[in-house]
Amino acid sequence: MIDRPLLGMHRPELEQWATAHGQSAFRGRQLHDWIYAKGARNIAAVTVLSKAWRDQLAAQPPTPALDWIGRSTELRRSVARDGTTKLLLGTADGLSLETVGIPAEGRLTVCVSSQVGCPMGCRFCATGKGGLQRSLAVHEIVDQVLWVREVMDQRPTHVVFMGMGEPLLNSEAVLEAIDCLCTDLGMAQRQITVSTVGVPKTLPTLAQRALERLGRAQFTLAVSLHAPSQPLREQLIPTAHAYPLEALLEDCRRYVGITGRRVSFEYILLGGLNDLPQQAVALAQLLRGFQSHVNLIPYNPIEEEDFQRPTPERVAAFKAALEQRHIAVSVRASRGLDQDAACGQLRRRTAQRDELAAS
Ligand code: SAH
Ligand code: SF4
């Protein structure tokens, strides 16, 4: 018998699960509808099932603190003036993670976490400051999209794995979650982006496993580059010393070769550090031959570091220098800057507040 949470299972698996529990396969189809379309938060809420069976299931959960459906609880909500909504969710084992809903004209993007914390320790990132607690399971990833749908009362159109954690350290669960988002929530793979800072030897495997698991790899891979040279990159990303830029770019080429998809590159702009015009020229040279897109991200200040936000003039000049060299480039709009905007900040602030309250 399958004894993991039901969230994350496709319709046939739910049918199997129902029959293994002595029910008809039809009950599995009903469960599918209630979990994904109706958003039932626990098995007791699936009132289409008999009360006797619900009581029996509630008395025997998969783990003591987890209901069969596998939803997390909402711990905190923070809504910015522009509608950007950051949620702090609590897992069954008492950890907390962030997810963000970002509304824009005609779309709703959910920024999901793939891990609680992150072991990569990038210097500019609030999530990296606390280290890794653990990777998230499939149900805990899909759950985030359901929470944003419910809280914002709107259907998410896009999902980006740009919340807490390094997705390539949890790639099987990430691929399974993508499969669930597409198969069970009706999203399109092309509207999903997986962002990585780079983990040696994982990119070609991700491409291969995506083909095996999803039949195709149409989601966008975004690689967090952040610097045009190895020494500067190592300064910002400690783990980069084990993964030279040339090796990372070679793996990107292999990824493109296997999937046929373009890779996009993210570049956080830190005032006076990596936002100089000559660094844009170096970046353009580095990316020659790539059919790529560069996404510039002006740094969101975090408490622990005193990096500077780049001036609007510097951002514009950096963008122009790339454009002159025929590199497709966009600048990420700062959303919700008034509400602990940088990823990992809501969780860190909450933890600090709780520590203060406890002391
Ligand atoms: N671990 C993955 C995905 C999560 S981080 C990765 O690093 O790509 C998602 C994005 O948020 C990354 O591009 C990262 O550089 C960016 N980011 C982290 N801290 C930031 C900050 N303080 N300001 C702006 N962007 C930040
Ligand atoms: Fe981890 Fe990404 Fe933050 Fe680096 S930027 S510490 S890889 S979450």
Image (cartoon, grey):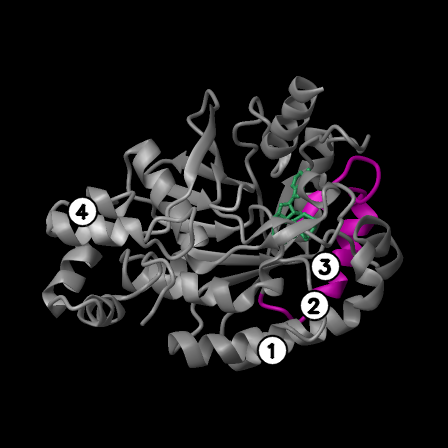
Relative depth, front residue between 244 and 324: 244
The residue at which mark 3 appears reads as: 284
Q: Callout 3: 10 Å neighbours few (<14), some, many (20+)?
A: many
Say which residue label 1 marks.
204
Q: CA distance from mark 2 to mark 1?
A: 21 Å
Quarter occupied by residue 182? bottom left
Crowding at dot 1, Cα within 10 Å, few <14 / some 14-19 / many 20+, comes out as some
Q: Is mark 3 within 8 Å of ligand 1?
A: no
Mark closer to the observer (4, 1)? 4
Magenta-tinted stretch: 267-291
Spatial separation of the CA atoms under disc 4 and disc 1: 42 Å
- Foreground of the two, 23 or 108: 23
Q: Residue at x 76, y 49 (%)?
A: 121
**Side of 232 where 177 appears, left or right:** left
Q: Measuring 32% from the left and 64% from the top, which residue is drawn there? A: 9
Task: Assess whether mark 2 and mark 3 are in contact (beta carbons under 8 angstroms).
Answer: yes
Displayed quadrant of residue 105: top left
Which quadrant is the C terminus positioned in?
top right
Q: Which residue is mark 2?
A: 288
Image coords of residue 82 (percent x, y)? 45, 24
Nearest to viewer (mark 2 / mark 4): 4
Please report whichever mark, 4 or 1, sits nearer to the chain's N-terminal start.
4
Q: Mark 1 falls on what kind of element?
A: helix
The secondary element bearing badge 3 is classed as: helix
Q: CA distance from mark 3 to mark 1?
A: 24 Å
Q: In the rendered view, would you say 88 is above or below 55?
A: above
Q: Estimate how packed mark 2 is, as few (under 14), some (14 to 19) or many (20 or more) residues with alpha carbons within 10 Å.
A: few
| Spot occupied by residue 348 in the image (x, y as percentages of width and height) | 65, 32
Q: Of circles 2 and 1, which is in front?
A: 1
Q: Does 16 sit above or below residue 238?
A: below
Name the side, left or right, on which 109 lies relative to 279: left
